[in-house]
Image (cartoon, rainbow, N blue to C red):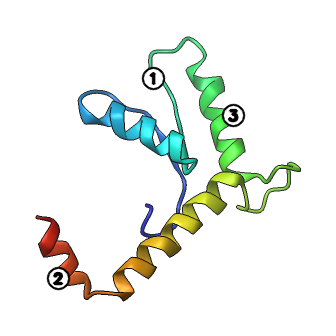
C-alpha cells in the first residue's frame, strides 16, 4: 500500500504483524487496532473515519494518514529513479 500511497488500518494477529502494525502507526501512515479489544467495532469505525476525513471532518481522502502515505510513496518512487527497480530489488534479496 505504501508503494501506492494508500494508508492502512492494521489488525495484526501474530508474529511480525505486530511489529509492522506498530511501525505503520509510528510512521503516521496508518492506524493499529487490537482485534481482541472490547471496543473493536467502535475503534474500527473511528479508524475508518480518521483515514477518510481531513482534520476538519471533510470526506475527501486528504487525512493526515493519506498525506503521510502519499509522501512515503513519493519518497519510494524518488529512490527508485536513481537505480533500476529490478537491480534495487535484487540487491535487497
Please report whichever mark, 2 or 1, sits nearer to the chain's N-terminal start.
1
Q: Residue furthest right?
A: 56
Q: To which residue does mark 3 refer? A: 46
Q: To which residue does mark 2 refer? A: 87
Left or right: residue 69 compared with residue 23 = right
Q: Position of residue 82 (x, y in %)?
A: 34, 87
Q: Position of residue 47 (x, y in %)?
A: 64, 38
The quadrant of the rendering that contains the N terminus is bottom left
User: What is the CA distance from the residue labelled 1 to the residue labelled 3?
Assistant: 14 Å
Instruction: Please tell me whether mark 3 or mark 2 is closer to you in this view.
Output: 2
The quadrant of the rendering that contains the C terminus is bottom left
Q: Nearer the viewer, residue 23 or 52?
A: 23
- SS at badge 1: loop
Q: Nearer the viewer, residue 52 or 73?
A: 73
The image quadrant that residue 15 belongs to is top left
Please report whichever mark, 3 or 2, sits nearer to the chain's N-terminal start.
3
* Placement of 35 over or under 73, stated as above or below: above
Left or right: residue 7 compared with residue 11 = right
* Placement of 30 over or under 1, stated as above or below: above
Is there a contact, CB below 8 Å, between mark 2 and mark 1? Answer: no
Q: Sort mark 2 into few (<14), some (14-19) or many (20+) by Cα contacts within 10 Å.
A: few
Instruction: Please tell me whether mark 2 or mark 1 is closer to you in this view.
Output: 2
Q: Residue at x 47, y 70 (%)?
A: 4
Q: Sort mark 1 into few (<14), some (14-19) or many (20+) by Cα contacts within 10 Å.
A: some
User: What is the CA distance from the residue labelled 2 to the residue labelled 1?
Assistant: 39 Å
User: What is the CA distance from the residue labelled 3 to the residue labelled 2?
Assistant: 41 Å
Is there a contact, CB below 8 Å, between mark 1 and mark 3? Answer: no
The number of callouts visible is 3
Q: Position of residue 52 (x, y in %)?
A: 70, 52
Q: Residue at x 45, y 62 (%)?
A: 2
- SS at badge 2: helix
Q: To which residue does mark 1 refer? A: 35
Amino acid at each position: 500500500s505504501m508503494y501506492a500511497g494508500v494508508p492502512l488500518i492494521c489488525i495484526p494477529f501474530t508474529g511480525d504483524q505486530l511489529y509492522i502494525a506498530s511501525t505503520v502507526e509510528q510512521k503516521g501512515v496508518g492506524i493499529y487496532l487490537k482485534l481482541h479489544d472490547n471496543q473493536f467495532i467502535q475503534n474500527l469505525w473511528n479508524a475508518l473515519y480518521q483515514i477518510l476525513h481531513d482534520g476538519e471532518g471533510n470526506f475527501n481522502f486528504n487525512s493526515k494518514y493519506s498525506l503521510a502515505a502519499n509522501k512515503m510513496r513519493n519518497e519510494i518512487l524518488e529512490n527508485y529513479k536513481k537505480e533500476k527497480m529490478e537491480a534495487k530489488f535484487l540487491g535487497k534479496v
